[in-house]
Image: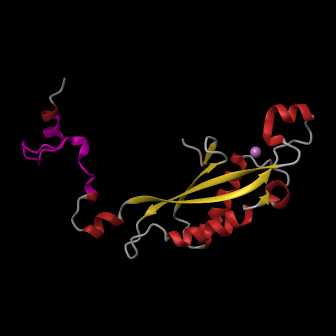
């Protein structure tokens, strides 16, 4: 066993021996609070906005038999449609703007989500009303990818091309997907 205090002194020779902070809890050098503004604005922070939409869909492949469609897609293959209460969690990541203190103004993000996703999808039949699902089954996976592409376009158009974007989409409280996927 290596003596933890010995290791700590080795890593932090400037510390006094009585410094009780373990090495792992030292903040990174750039976060040392020389001045509040400098310390905060260098940090990357994720901000989140939750949105909802209710929509109908059907998962179906016309090139498959009815039996195979039902076996693979189950209740989501119902010929007369059915709905889900979708919950979308949008995560935007970037550095803090030194003037506003925001990564992104959440009002701006709210409007982009509405314009690009929820106003288009809410109370719609995804298969019939949305051109992106005319030939693409509206699974949660495919909805997440389509929503991400539209939100990316909206963020870029608003001057936020430098911000990272990640989505979590709930089709039910227990079934949800994330895009981009975890590595
Ligand atoms: Ni379904």
Question: Where is residue 30 drawn, in percent x and y?
Answer: 28, 58
The region drawn magenta spans 7-30
Residue 17 to residue 47: above or below = above
Q: Residue furthest top?
A: 1
Question: Where is residue 177 drawn, in percent x and y?
Answer: 63, 45
Horizontal side of 126 relative to 80 (left or right) equals: left
| Quadrant where the image shows the C terminus | top right
Question: Where is residue 106 drawn, in percent x and y?
Answer: 51, 69
Residue 111 falls inside the magenta stretch? no
Q: Quadrant of ligand 1?
A: top right
At 49% from the left edge and 68% from the top edge, which residue is drawn?
A: 104
Viewer-proximal residue, 142 or 56?
56
At 63% from the left edge and 48% from the top edge, which residue is drawn?
A: 170
Horizontal side of 82 relative to 10 (left or right) equals: right
Residue 97 to residue 173: above or below = below
Q: Which quadrant of the figure has residue 90?
A: bottom right
């Amino acid at each position: 066993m290596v003596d933890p205090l010995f290791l700590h002194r080795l890593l932090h020779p400037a510390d006094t021996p009585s410094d009780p902070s373990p090495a792992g809890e030292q903040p990174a050098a750039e976060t040392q609070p020389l001045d509040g503004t400098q310390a905060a604005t260098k940090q990357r922070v994720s901000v989140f906005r939750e949105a909802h939409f209710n929509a109908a869909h059907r998962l179906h492949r016309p090139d498959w038999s009815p039996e195979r469609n039902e076996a693979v897609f189950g209740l989501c293959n119902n010929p007369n449609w059915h709905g889900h209460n979708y919950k979308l969690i949008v995560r935007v990541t970037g550095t803090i703007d030194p003037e506003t203190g925001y990564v992104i103004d959440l009002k701006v993000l709210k409007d982009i989500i509405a314009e690009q996703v929820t106003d288009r999808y809410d109370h719609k039949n995804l298969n019939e009303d949305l051109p992106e699902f005319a030939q693409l089954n509206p699974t949660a996976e495919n909805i997440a990818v389509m929503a991400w592409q539209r939100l990316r376009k909206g963020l870029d158009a608003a001057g936020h091309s430098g911000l990272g974007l990640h989505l979590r989409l709930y089709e039910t409280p227990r079934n949800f997907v994330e895009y981009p996927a975890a590595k």
